[in-house]
Amino acid sequence: MNDQELYEQLVSVMEDLPFLVVEARRQRGLSQEQASIQMNVPQSTLSRLQHEPKIDMQMSTVLKILRWLAGPQGERDDANGR
């Protein structure tokens, strides 16, 4: 995969993030509140993401959500930012 394809794939994931989160929550049988606790992000952020998909979020929040989507292997020690 070349750089252009990688960036296009990244854009696609970011655009699909609201759908990906909702689907992952449903598959895991979690409420927004339960998922937000696991992600360590406010429940209101997940609600806004689901209902206002064009919201701006901090990169640290996006990374927490992506790590949660990746599952246990994607989780990192947030205290160290890694």
Image: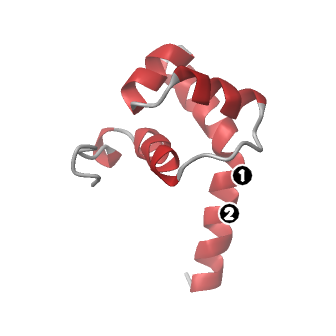
Q: Which residue does the image show at 63% across and 54% down from the upper left?
A: 13
Q: Which residue does the image show at 40% across and 22% down from the upper left?
A: 37
- Classify residue 55 as left or right of residue 40: right
Find residue 6 and report its horizontal and vertical position in percent: 58, 74
Q: Is residue 30 visible?
A: no
Q: Is residue 61 above or below residue 50?
A: below
Say if mark 1 contacts mark 2, CB within 8 Å: yes
Residue 11's label in the rendered image is: 2
In the rendered image, which residue does mark 1 sit on? 15
Name the quadrant containing residue 54.
top right
Mark 2, secondary structure of its residue: helix
Residue type beneath disc 1: Glu
Residue type beneath disc 2: Val
Find residue 50 and report its horizontal and vertical position in percent: 70, 29
Mark 1, secondary structure of its residue: helix
Q: Which residue does the image show at 48% across and 47% down from the upper left?
A: 66
Quadrant location of the C terminus? bottom left
